[in-house]
Image: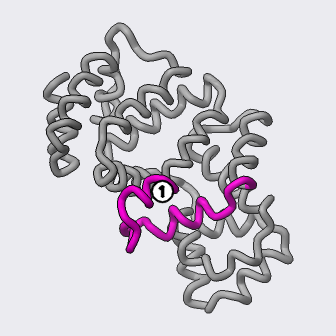
Amino acid sequence: MLAGAAFLNAAAGGYSEESRVCITDLALNHPEIIYARLGLEWTGENRTPPTETYTAILAFYDCLTDTEKAVWLIETFTAIDAVSPLTGADLIALLPESQATCVRETLSAESYAAMEAATPLVATSIGFEAAACLAIESAATFLVAATEALLGPLSDESAACVGGVVAARPTYVPFVASHLNGPSTLSPDEFVQTAEVGFELFECLNEDELAAINSLVETLGAN
């Protein structure tokens, strides 16, 4: 288990001494999280219940400095986007015709084609200049569809909650998408304060949906 924690440290380019100590303690208390980050399924005892997955992931996150958090968030968002089976074309297909037409007419032919072929977050970044074409409900539909593509169907309650997060923070997904290549001119703490709002989405999920996150983390670890 300590070897797994060391591997995570090496893979991330080296954490601070304080972070390494914290992650080592976490590895001893939540070994299944470290296994998942390595792309392995934990078969031992004391597996964290799905309802505590959110807490365990936050514990790992809280071990990090602001600079390490910024790197981890960008790498995580990028990895999740890379394994999504959806493309920009799938998202455009979810739009009402009037909004889809607006997007197509706003973007250049080259940008529109690139957006259609891209993964969801990359497509969002490419299509940012057409953001005014979308209703808040459409942005919520995008995030629900992207979440279901990774975790499976959401309950009506969970989908409504995810939509509510988007409605409350309509610029969140475009913000994340625009910083996939790094937090630009923002300081690490400024980037982290905005980007970590995404953790609120965990609170929308029921036990079965949280359990699916374990499988997603294993998938990310294996890639």
Number of callouts in the render? 1
Which residue is pictured at 64% across the width and 64% down the height?
A: 171
Q: Front-most of 199 and 82?
A: 199
User: Is 68 placed above or below 8 here?
Assistant: below
Q: Is residue 51 magenta?
A: no
Tell me which colouring the rendered structure shows: one colour
Which residue is pictured at 80% across the width and 67% down the height?
A: 135
Image side of residue 187 versus residue 174, left or right: left
Which residue is pictured at 17% across the width and 43% down the height?
A: 16
Q: Quadrant of the N terminus?
A: top left
Three-letter amino acid code of the residue under disc 1 = Asp
Q: Front-most of 11 and 91?
A: 11
Q: Residue furthest top?
A: 45
> Where is residue 64 shown, x and y percent of the image?
30, 42
User: Is 99 placed above or below 26 here?
Assistant: below
Quadrant of the rendered structure where residue 48 is? top left
User: Is 52 placed above or below 127 here?
Assistant: above
> Where is residue 11 shown, x and y percent of the image?
20, 46
Quadrant of the rendered structure where residue 8 is? top left
Which residue is pictured at 54% across the width and 42% down the height?
A: 199
Which SS class for mark 1?
Answer: helix
For disc 1, the marked residue is: 81
> Where is residue 121 shown, x and y percent of the image?
53, 63
Q: Is residue 190 magenta?
A: yes
Chain part drawn in magenta: 167-194
